[in-house]
Amino acid sequence: MEVQIAVAKVNKYAISESGDTLEVVERPNGGLSVVLADGQTSGRGAKAISQMVVRKVIGLLAEGVRDGAAARAASDALFTEKQGKVICTLNIASLDLQSRTVVLTRNNPAPIFICRGDRIDCLAEESIPLGTSRNLRPLISEVAIEPGVIIVIYTDGILHAGKRRGTPMDVAETIRSVLEDQDPGPQNLADALLAQAVRLDENRPADDISVLVLKITSRIGDNVRRMSVRLPIEGYTRE
Amino acid sequence: MEVQIAVAKVNKYAISESGDTLEVVERPNGGLSVVLADGQTSGRGAKAISQMVVRKVIGLLAEGVRDGAAARAASDALFTEKQGKVICTLNIASLDLQSRTVVLTRNNPAPIFICRGDRIDCLAEESIPLGTSRNLRPLISEVAIEPGVIIVIYTDGILHAGKRRGTPMDVAETIRSVLEDQDPGPQNLADALLAQAVRLDENRPADDISVLVLKITSRIGDNVRRMSVRLPIEGYTRE
C-alpha cells in the first residue's frame, strides 16, 4: 500500500503571512504525523500562535507522546501563555503503523470528511479550539489503514468561504464531484476544494485556507518515499 | 517565481528504518528550510541520532536562530551526548526571503551540485560531519534566488553506490543527462539520481539514500502553496 498526502494552502487576500501552519513529522515508531493549526485572526500574530502550537505538538510527537496528550499539552501551554484570550484550532492526522490506523485528532469546529468508495462520512461532532480553557478534550477517531480511504481536513477558511455573499460552500458536494472522476489523486482533490473556496470568495480569500487530503492506495511500487513542495514567492513576481 | 522542492528517499536493503531524516520547517521571517541528516550506521540507532539532530536544528531555526548557529548547536549537543563517538552528517537548505538567497549549510563530505543552464558547479570543499569535535565549523554558501537555479543535495548512500562493485556513480554525469531533457521537474531529477544509485547497488541499496533537489522557476501562477508526500507502507504489501 501507499499513503499519499497532499496539501494546498493560500493566504487571506492581501495578507502576506498565513495564520495557518502545517508541518509533517516522522513518528519515532514509524509512520508520520501531519499537524495543522490555525491561529486566531490573521497575519503575523496568528502565525506566531499557530507556529507555537505546531512546534509544541511536533516536539512531543517526536518524543513518542501520543497525539491526544500532545494536543492537550499544546492547549494548556497556549492557555497559560495567553490566559485564555487567544484560540487556535488544531488537527493531527497520524499514520500509526502500530495500531494500523490513521489517528485523527481534532480541536477544530471544521468537520473532517472520510470517503470510502461512494460513501462520504462527516465527523462533525462539536469540537472546541485550543486555548479556550484548561482540560480541553480533543476528539479522536481512528480509521483503519486500507486502500480506498480518503480523508479530508481543512481550516475554517473553507467554512467561511462565500458566506459573506450568502453562498456558503457545500464541501461534501465538491468532494463528490471530484471523486466521480477516475481515481483522482489527493492533490487534485485538495486543489479543487481550495479553488472552489477561492471562487466563492470572488478570488479574494476572506481568510487563510488550508486543505489536507490523505489517500491510501493499493499501489505496490518501488519502496521510495517522495515529497514535493511548491512555494510561490510573492513580491518577486511583481518586479 | 516559484521554488520547487523534491525529495526521494530509500532505505538500505532489508532495513526497515532509514538512518536519514529529512524535515521541512517554515522560517519565522518567511521562506522555509529543509534539514537533512544522516546518522552513523543504519537502522534504529542511526534514526535516533539523525532525528535528534534534525529536531535540534529545526527547533532553533523556528526560533529565528541562523542556520550556521543551529548547525553548531546541534554538533555540540551531539558531541556532548555521545562524547564524540557518534557522527551525523547535516545539510540545511534555506530559502531566505530577507537575503533573497538560498543558504546552503553543509557538514557532510558529500558535495552539493548547483546547476544554472548548461553549467554544473560542485561545492566539494572538505566538510566534516557533526559530533566529531567541539567548535565544528559548517560550510555555508549562498546562491541568489533566480529562475533556472537547480541545487542537488544528497546523503552518502549516493557516494557509496556501486563502489563495492568498482562502479561508483558519476553524479554530475547523471544530472547532466537528466537536464538535457526539456525542463525536467525536480522530482524527475531526484528520482533519476536515486534510481541510478539503486541500480549501481544492484537493487539492494548498500546504505540509506536520500536525494533533495531544489529548483527555482519563473512560473507565475496562483499563489497556492502545495505539498505532497508519498509513503509506501512496507510489510503491508507482503500480506
Image (cartoon, coloured by chain):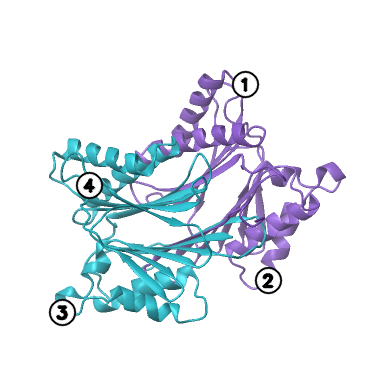
Chain colours: A purple, B cyan
- The residue drawn where x is 20% and y is 52% is B128
* Quadrant location of the C terminus of chain A in the rendered image: bottom right
Q: Would residue B142 be found to the left or right of residue B50 on screen?
A: right
Q: Is residue B12 above or below residue A201?
A: below
Q: Would residue B235 be found to the left or right of residue B137 on screen?
A: right
Callouts 2 and 4 in the same chain: no
Q: Cβ–Cβ below 8 Å for labels 2 and 1?
A: no
Q: Is residue B121 above or below residue A87?
A: below
Indicate the secondary structure of the residue bearing disc 1.
loop
Residue lying furthest right: A166
Q: Nearer the viewer, mark 4 or mark 1?
A: 4
Q: Amino acid at mark 3?
A: Gly
Q: Amino acid at mark 1?
A: Lys
Q: Earlier in the sequence, mark 3 or mark 4?
A: 4
Residue to which mark 2 is pinned: A181
Q: Would residue B237 be found to the left or right of residue A136 on screen?
A: left
Number of the label disc, if any, that sits on residue B130: 4
Callouts 3 and 1 in the same chain: no
Number of the label disc, if any, that sits on residue B166: 3
Label 2 Cα crowd, 10 Å radius (few <14 / some 14-19 / many 20+): few
Indicate the secondary structure of the residue bearing disc 3.
loop
Give the image quarter of residue B59. top left
> What whole-number distance in Å separates the C-alpha atoms at marks 2 and 1?
45 Å
Residue to which mark 1 is pinned: A85
Q: Amino acid at mark 4?
A: Leu
Indicate the secondary structure of the residue bearing disc 4.
loop
Q: Earlier in the sequence, mark 2 or mark 1?
A: 1
- The residue drawn where x is 59% and y is 62% is A187
Q: Cβ–Cβ below 8 Å for labels 3 and 4?
A: no
Q: Cβ–Cβ below 8 Å for labels 2 and 4?
A: no
Callouts 3 and 4 in the same chain: yes
Label 1 Cα crowd, 10 Å radius (few <14 / some 14-19 / many 20+): few
